[in-house]
Image (cartoon, rainbow, N blue to C red):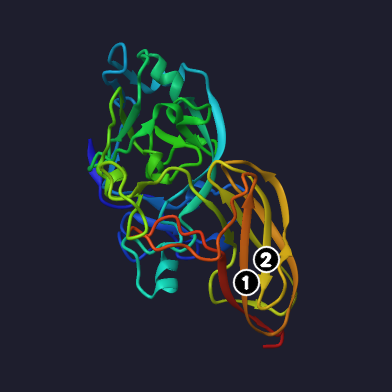
């Protein structure tokens, strides 16, 4: 097995931008270019921590091990394909999505890649339930953590509590939007952990350890945590390990965009971890908050598309957007600083220009 230091798929500038760190392995989607509800595979954002493994599907194996299994078990891709097939439509969002907004709000950037709002996508993931796979090795009473590990050059790994691992919509995906997983997105098999940060959905899955003990790694103790002066350390972690993603709104419009003045439809998307969006409100400049129209589908754990009809004068405008989910969570006016720059979800603000048609 060899490893490749960059992204395989083409990254045309009209569909992607690169944050200013890790440009060889990170690329975010320009949401303004998305044509529909699902994010096409070729335009789905990429976040890889290490070099990408080039794997042969015929040689790939998944090892199940750990003291909370009745026996060790090794599976081929053919073994997985004999299990019941399931499909879920779910979002995968990097915990650092919108990190660049910390620099805007606090005057200094948080550590890490300076993502805009495009480190997120929604796809139909098809594969097998993780619990069906673990059952082949006999999960014993007292199992506490499942540690999935990738076959990338750094063996990225981050633990799941057993209840989340056994959930109906935690799957090992073998296909993405009806096609075999692209290599940048985890070929031949990856986890999809619904509603949690993208780092939990381990790509290029190669090993699953099931333990009666806590299985901590760097990626849930020293990164992908809420750490800083306002957050307490939890156990071995430098802060609070991140799990479920918060409510967030996105605008299908880039900061500084130029639109035509007059009757206009502004569009965007909203999502909330494991929840479902029930309302999106928009405020143009100093006007009142208005309810946006929510469109179907509206899938919990994925997102909903919204639109707002408005009249634009020829001028500079600022659009604010806030979303609310079915659990009562709403985007706050401000967020508290955290050192790793994760979970930014303050009210979304986009500035743009409207111009007369004759300009």
Eyeballing the image, is 161 above or below 139?
Answer: below
According to the image, label 2 marks what residue?
282
Crowd rating for badge 1 (residues with CA inside 10 Å; few <14, some 14–19, many 20+): some
| Residues at discs 2 and 1 in contact (Cβ within 8 Å) | yes
Eyeballing the image, is 278 above or below 138?
Answer: below
Question: Which quarter of the picture shows residue 156?
Answer: top left
According to the image, label 1 marks what residue?
319
x then y, percent, for residue 188: 38, 33
Given the current orientation, which residue lies at the most extreme bottom position? 359
- Quadrant placement of the C terminus: bottom right
Q: Residue at x 48, y 47 (%)?
A: 245
Q: Residue at x 40, y 57 (%)?
A: 27
Q: Would you say 70 lies left or right of 17 here? A: left
Question: Which of the two labelled residues, at mark 2 and mark 1, occupies the earlier sequence position?
Answer: 2
x then y, percent, for residue 66: 27, 21
x then y, percent, for residue 169: 52, 31
Q: Nearer the viewer, residue 258 or 304?
A: 304
Q: Would you say 210 lies left or right of 34 here? A: left
Question: Which quarter of the picture shows residue 33?
Answer: bottom right
Q: Would you say 173 lies left or right of 159 here? A: right
The label shown at residue 14 is none
- Quadrant placement of the N terminus: top left
User: What SS does tag 2 mark?
Assistant: strand
Q: CA distance from mark 2 to mark 1?
A: 7 Å
Q: Nearer the viewer, residue 8 or 290?
A: 290
């Amino acid at each position: 097995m060899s490893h490749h230091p960059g992204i395989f798929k083409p990254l045309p500038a009209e569909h992607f931008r690169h944050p200013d760190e890790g440009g060889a392995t990170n690329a975010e989607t320009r949401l303004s270019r998305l044509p529909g509800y699902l994010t096409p595979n070729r335009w789905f954002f990429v976040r890889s921590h290490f070099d990408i493994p080039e794997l042969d599907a015929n040689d790939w194996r998944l090892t199940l091990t750990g003291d909370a299994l009745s026996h060790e078990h090794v599976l081929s891709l053919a073994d997985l394909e004999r299990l019941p097939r399931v499909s879920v439509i779910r979002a995968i969002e990097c915990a650092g999505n919108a990190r660049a907004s910390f620099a805007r709000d606090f005057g200094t950037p948080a550590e890490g890649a300076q993502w805009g709002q495009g480190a997120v996508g929604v796809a139909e993931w098809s594969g097998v339930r993780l619990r069906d796979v673990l059952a082949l090795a006999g999960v014993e009473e007292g199992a506490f953590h499942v540690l999935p590990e990738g076959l990338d050059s750094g063996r990225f790994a981050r633990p799941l509590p057993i209840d989340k691992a056994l959930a109906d919509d935690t799957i090992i995906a073998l296909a993405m939007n009806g096609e075999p997983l692209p290599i940048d997105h985890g070929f031949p098999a990856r986890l999809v952990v619904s509603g949690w940060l993208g780092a939990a959905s381990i790509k290029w899955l190669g090993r699953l350890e099931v333990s009666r003990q806590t299985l901590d790694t760097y990626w849930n103790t020293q990164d992908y945590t809420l750490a800083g002066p306002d957050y307490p350390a939890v156990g071995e972690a430098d802060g609070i390990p991140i799990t479920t993603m918060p409510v967030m709104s996105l605008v299908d419009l880039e900061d500084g965009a130029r639109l035509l003045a007059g009757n206009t439809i502004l569009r965007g998307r909203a999502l909330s971890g494991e929840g479902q969006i029930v309302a999106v409100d928009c405020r143009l400049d100093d006007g009142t908050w208005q309810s946006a129209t929510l469109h179907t589908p509206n899938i919990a754990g994925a997102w909903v598309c919204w639109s707002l009809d408005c009249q634009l004068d020829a001028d500079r405008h600022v659009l604010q957007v806030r979303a609310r989910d079915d659990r009562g969570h709403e985007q706050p006016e401000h967020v508290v600083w955290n050192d790793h720059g994760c979970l930014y979800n303050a009210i979304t603000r986009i500035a743009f220009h409207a111009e007369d048609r004759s300009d």
